Image (cartoon, helix red, strand yellow):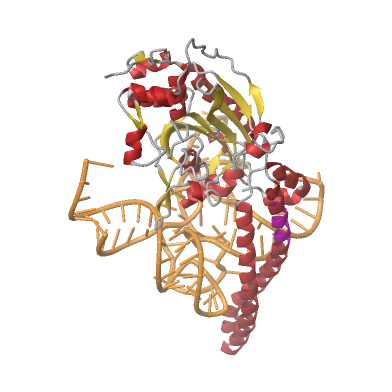
Amino acid sequence: MIDIKLLTANPQELISLLGARNPKYSKLASEVLAQQEVYKQELFQVEAMRAERNELSKKIGILRAQEGEEAAKRSMQTVSKIKEEMQAKEEKLKTLKNNIDEILASIPNIPDVSVPIGEDESGNQLVKENALPIPSFNFTPKDHHELGEKLGILDFATAAKLSGSRFVLLRGDGARLERALISFMLDTHTKNGYTEFMPPAIVNASALFGTGQLPKFKEDMYHVDSESDQYLISTAEIPLTNLYAGETLPANQLPKAFTAYTPCFRKEAGTYGKDTRGLIRNHQFNKVELVWLSTPQESMQILEKMTKEAELILELLGLPYRRVLLCTGDMGFSSAKTYDLEVWFPSEGKFREISSCSNCTDFQARRMGLRFKKEGEKGTELVHTLNGSGVAVGRAFAAILENYQQEDGSIIVPEVLRPYFGKDKIEANV
RNA sequence: GGAGAGAUGGCUGAGUGGUCGAAAGCAACGGUUUGCUAAACCGUCGUACGGAAUUAAUUCCGUACCGAGGGUUCGAAUCCCUCUCUCUCCGCCA
């Protein structure tokens, strides 16, 4: 949620920044401003009425003792009248407030000043060229889908039989490679100071509201139980960021760094026909996530640090990658600034997203009531939250198959994975 | 799944309709005392929102908040309803 005070203070600036994401948001912001003005006036009146009621009510007890039942009754009647008037106004006030909250909840975060203006991904900025050698093949490289099926480690047909489209069954070395990747990533991050978690994969609606998946992106979530209003997580960002929701942390505990491996579940509504083959876009996939809670002062530096730590995974795996700064039109809902890491896919001859690292500033913290307090100072401040994939496991799996493929269809296992995987090569195992 | 108990400020814990935003204790903070530490004593000690004053730190006023949401009442931490969570016992289960 954006800060309505900030919006009131610099309406033009914020409205145009939001418009840079999508023009519809500047309209929403103007609407909120107009309604907020009415709301403030109404609230002022109602509060004055409440003050009068409280004052008179308080005196009734005393009045009865001093001047008797009659005087008390007269006073009660006066207050009853105030109460009636007040109830009508309160009704109106509640409707207004709900309306404002609803619109406010659907407005995305304000882009940071360093974010390029642009409508879609064509406006993104390449900020770091690939430094690792792109593998050259003296044969036509196959895609990971074909490689994996031939090796018997990826089985999409059986997954479809069990579940449906956009699922995968990992078998033998495939399952083991996935597990090796997860362990390698977690070990690397915990060595860098992240605290490891194994969070629930089912969360409630209020956690989803906190990180911004609800109410706007409901159609992409698996709703597992409507009675208890619980959903399968679409990313570990949800449980990790909500860990301290509703709490006030001592400033000296910040920053906090969390990592977790979880399966992630997405309906992928609206992506029909996109990446239907392979590991790129599935309903269930594994991801190792990084989450930071920090003070506002250091969150931008932490975004740089966290992105480097995600890059480290790709470097250690020897996968060619580059870093892209997303433009206003391509950024996610909660983010103020996002870097995407893209990894090289030889079969397509292009780089594809494997990690997304975002600074959500106080946007999520405001939604979930996550604050911090400096020792000896009055009042509290909103925490800044950051999240990044460190990295998507399925996509890393796919990139390894493609980049490390041999002419005979076997795969050389990257050196850092060998302690986890136990072998240096994946070969067809008939 | 069944039965019962509970949820109050940073923590412990009192409070069953009228100056209760909430006793008391602990912790914390400021001070007095002290050779130092400790102890003792005095004081301060919630958050959010709105308004007023101040250059500002801040102060004052109002409103809301005693798990959440509704209701009763002139007035609710206190009474009623619904929900959530925690604990104990039984059942079931990896």
Q: Nearer the viewer, residue A21 or A278?
A: A278
Q: Position of residue A347 (x, y in %)?
A: 50, 21
Residue A182 among those drawn in magenta: no
Q: Position of residue A317 (x, y in %)?
A: 47, 18
Q: Position of residue A122 (x, y in %)?
A: 66, 32
Q: Quadrant of residue A337?
A: top right
Residue lying at the far top in this picture: please name it.
A138
Tell me: residue A86, above or below residue A308: below
- Residue occupying image coordinates x 62% and y 79%: A84
Whether residue A190 appears in this view of the structure is no
Q: Which residues are magenta?
A: A29-37
- Residue occupying image coordinates x 71% and y 62%: A40
Q: Please identify the quadrant where the C terminus of chain A is shown.
A: top left
Q: How many marks?
A: 0
Left/right placement of residue A60 relative to residue A191 reads right
Most common secondary structure along the magenta stretch: helix
- Residue occupying image coordinates x 68% and y 45%: A22
Q: Quadrant of residue A409?
A: top left
Residue lying at the far front in this picture: please name it.
A140
Q: Nearer the viewer, residue A12 or A318?
A: A318
Q: Quadrant of residue A334?
A: top right
Whether residue A328 appears in this view of the structure is yes
Residue lying at the far bottom in this picture: please name it.
A70
Left/right placement of residue A171 relative to residue A165 reads left
Q: Position of residue A212 (x, y in %)?
A: 55, 46
Residue A35 among those drawn in magenta: yes
Left/right placement of residue B76 relative to residue A47 reads left
